[in-house]
Image (tube, rainbow, N blue to C red):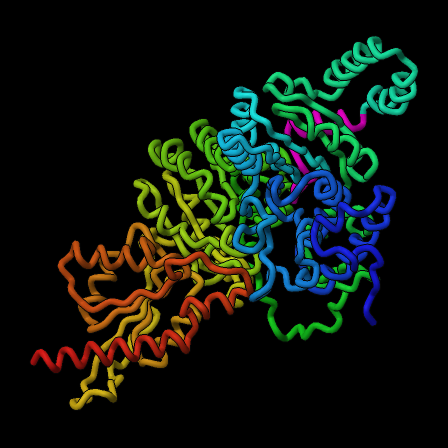
Amino acid sequence: MKTTFTLLDLLDDPSDLRLLKINQLPKLAAEIRAFLIKSVSSSGGHFASNLGAVELSIALHYVFDTPNDSLIWDVGHQAYVHKILTKRKAKLSSIRQKGGLAPFPSRFESKYDAFGVGHSSTSISAALGMAIAYAAQNKRNQAIAIIGDGAMTAGQAFEALNHAGGIGANILVILNDNDMSISPNVGALQGMLTRALSNPILQEMRQTSKNILENLPRQALNIARKAEEHLKDFVTGGIIFEELGFKYFGPIDGHDLDELVATLENLKSIPGPKLLHVATKKGKGYAPAERNPIEYHAVSPFDPEIGIVPATANSKEINFKIPKKLTYTQVFSDWLCYKAALEDQLVAITPAMREGSGLVAFSKSYPSRYFDTAIAEQHAVTLAAGMACAGLKPVLAIYSTFLQRGFDQLIHDVAVQNLPVIFALDRAGIVGPDGATHAGSFDLSFLRAIPNLIILAPSDEQMLWAMLNSAYAQNCPVAIRYPRGNGRGISIADKTQILPIACSEMIFEGGFNYKIEHTKEHKKISLLVISIGSMFEMSECIASFFDASLMDLRCVKPLDGRLLTSALTKHDFIITIEDNAISGGAGSAIHEWMSENDIYKPIKHFGLADIFPEHGERAYIMETMGLSSDKIITSVSSWLAKNIQNRSSDK
């Protein structure tokens, strides 16, 4: 049965919203919250952060003239309500799915999405750029950055604040403070904000100041208001933003629409840099999400009447004869705790991704050796370098896509000094529903160019464990990249295994009797399939189809020259299969090595095409990039036939 939303059903875009009376907005907020719970619980997606941003999103579109005024959402997973209010309500259930709405704001999707986003802490820089452009063109458009979920902890946010305050730009920054990122927020800044929101002096001042000020004459009123603001700055720590050149307002209740609308209306007419501190509750309006915002940050479909059911709830129904496949993240997590028990020097670092990177168990077992730098990837890399200089063995657990932000530090602070830092790169390759911003498409390409760095790519769980052991034994930086999701079901049989660094292995050699049926001579050829990392099972299938040889590369840098020389000279044709960009990837490394060693054989590379992947399930995205067994077999068959034909013609 279709649910009726009295006000929400009347809205098509923000111009309709602005026709409502302000006393109707709380009812609209309740309807949107109910719609969010219904939609996201059925389709999955980012949940708790959007429940906390309902009133703020309504107030912003109610007060500002969007899309002429630009709303720039930081991180972007708090923008579902923004999408609902901007002509995309009917498509919300398709979010993060093939052909559906993008998971974050996208300029390609809507004119209301002023800036595309996916990584954090970019909103203030982008809003400043727009404010400068508007001023240069004598436009009255407003630029509003909404930053929250821990994004204010990143250096880029403060770089932008410093610049905006220094030039007096007409910009409004809204700090949506919900005391959370994905993991709980950490650091001195968050401590300051938390103290501000809980300070009893501030609470009493907020409750009584309106009554006092209303009874004062105009001149005294202005003096009193200035005094109140200075006292509030002192109590809240807003003086930090004031010193950066911003007028600080707040904190105010981010769920009080009357206060939000009135405050935003006032700020709209105040020129120069302004920062509004808004206090919201992540998961607001859905009790399970309020109690556990981490679990409800991003959800798979669930029954909202019951909530998310723990994975162990149906354990009685599991067929225990079928071994459970561990995820690569879980293997890393288990290794980290195992190794920490043996090695006192081991420490672990994460830039605010404790849950996703598998550091929960370690953080609880070894709290003094666990370091969350908040959303500050550059700092995390250099922090690891400093630790390594002083004798510790740091392991930086970070998503492949987020290491891109620490590229300079990886080169100058770690690799130039040849420091023993282990980079555990989760979510390498195609991730799926989160789209281009979260795909780990480029790590092999940008890491290969860095001297002193070893690069490993495991094909199964035992290999990941052994590679972590091997990395720990090195006295130089090592990067190990692995995908999201389950391994192949290979048990960890040897926890002490250490691999040689150039550790490629020939899995099997083919019979060299595959015939190209399209040639007159039906010549036999020999084919070598080189698999990189998580593409092993697909590579094994393709090698079997062609009766080809199969090599598991494992070490992308340095390459196993001995084995490569033997295998490449023995085979007529070579194909490489990886889930990294073809440009500069592992296949390119092999091609370059062949050229340097005067080995000239036809070689074809399969990997991620020179496009940004769309959002959708991993299998679908891989299919669109030609990375399915059927598509590779078809492509290789055609390639072989063409090359055999050319050889025959040459003769």
Quadrant that contains the N terminus: bottom right
Q: Position of residue 115 (x, y in %)?
A: 55, 44
Q: Which quarter of the figure has residue 65?
A: top right
Q: How many labels sit on residues? A: 0
Query: Please, is residue 565 above or below residue 502 in the view?
Result: below
Query: Please, is residue 268 above or below residue 504 in the view?
Result: above
Query: Please, is residue 390 above or below residue 632 in the view?
Result: above
Residue 125 seen in render: no
Residue 547 appears left or right of 95: left
Q: List the single residue furthest toward the bottom.
A: 520
Closest to the observer, 226 or 634: 226
Q: List the single residue furthest toward the left.
A: 651
Residue 489 appears left or right of 566: right
Q: Position of residue 574 (x, y in %)?
A: 26, 69
Residue under the point 44% across and 52% down: 481
Q: Position of residue 63 (x, y in %)?
A: 73, 38
Q: Which quarter of the figure has residue 299?
A: bottom right
Closest to the observer, 559 or 497: 559
Residue 485 seen in render: yes
Residue under the point 46% across and 50% down: 468
What segment is highlighted magenta in the picture? 180-198
Residue under the point 18% across and 67% down: 601
Quadrant that contains the C terminus: bottom left
Residue under the point 86% across and 47% down: 24
Magenta highlight on residue 189: yes
Closest to the observer, 421 or 126: 126
Magenta highlight on residue 515: no
Residue 334 appears left or right of 8: left
Q: Position of residue 487 (x, y in %)?
A: 52, 64
